[in-house]
Amino acid sequence: MVMEIEINIKNMKQILYLMILFFVVLSTRVMAQDASIFPKGEISNTGNHTGTIWLNELNKPDSNFNYSIAVATYAPGAKLDWHIHPGGQILLITEGTGYYQEKGKPIQIIHKGDVITCLPGVAHWHGASPGSSFAYIATTPTEKGKTIWLQRVTDAEYNAVK
């Protein structure tokens, strides 16, 4: 009987080790799937936002391609000021939950996998929700000019989410 108990304890330990190994492998795969394929970049110090935003310019416009591509990563609650892209912009949301608002319209809650089309000449802002980081890949045509920065997003505007 003592021998049976020792064998059962040994079997239980093996089962426990296998379960731990299984969960470690599973969680590593899940984390690898959620990891960004581009690094965060440098913390932006441009003064056209509130909170911490990292920017990684993947492509700057040149004589061959007249658009920029960048990755922006926002800490929870971080947001850009109101602004206009003369040539428009497309945002491919890659992480978290954020907000997007065009002047005169309600705030949209946006999530990983959403695609936002910022129309040329339309004042808007975007940023992270209070409880989530937020990231996107942005492509911005530059032939019509650089981003025009406007006023800060007020607390009342940011908190107007419904």
Image (cartoon, helix red, strand yellow):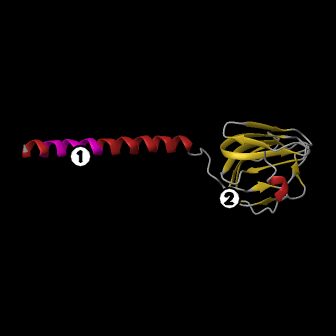
Q: Is residue 57 left or right of residue 148?
A: left
Chief SS of the magenta region: helix
Q: Quadrant of residue 41?
A: bottom right
- In this figure, which residue is indicated by the disc labeled 1? 13
Element assignment for label 2 = strand
Highlighted magenta segment, given as a residue range: 6-17
Badge 2 local density, few (<14 within 10 Å), some, or many (20+)?
few
- Indicate which label's residue lies in the foreground, 1 or 2: 1
- In this figure, which residue is indicated by the disc labeled 2? 42
Q: CA distance from mark 1 to mark 2?
A: 47 Å
Instruction: Give the percent coordinates (x, y) of residue 157.
Output: 84, 53
In the image, residue 138 above or below residue 158? above
Instruction: Give the percent coordinates (x, y) of residue 120.
Output: 90, 40
Question: In the depicted view, which residue is nearer to us: 157 or 41?
Answer: 157
Q: Residue at x 89, y 58 (%)?
A: 151
Element assignment for label 1 = helix
Question: In the depicted view, which residue is nearer to us: 152 or 46?
Answer: 152
Instruction: Give the percent coordinates (x, y) of residue 104.
Output: 92, 44
Which mark is on residue 95? none
Does residue 61 appear anywhere in the picture?
no
Instruction: Give the percent coordinates (x, y) of residue 36.
Output: 59, 45
Q: Quadrant of the N terminus?
A: top left
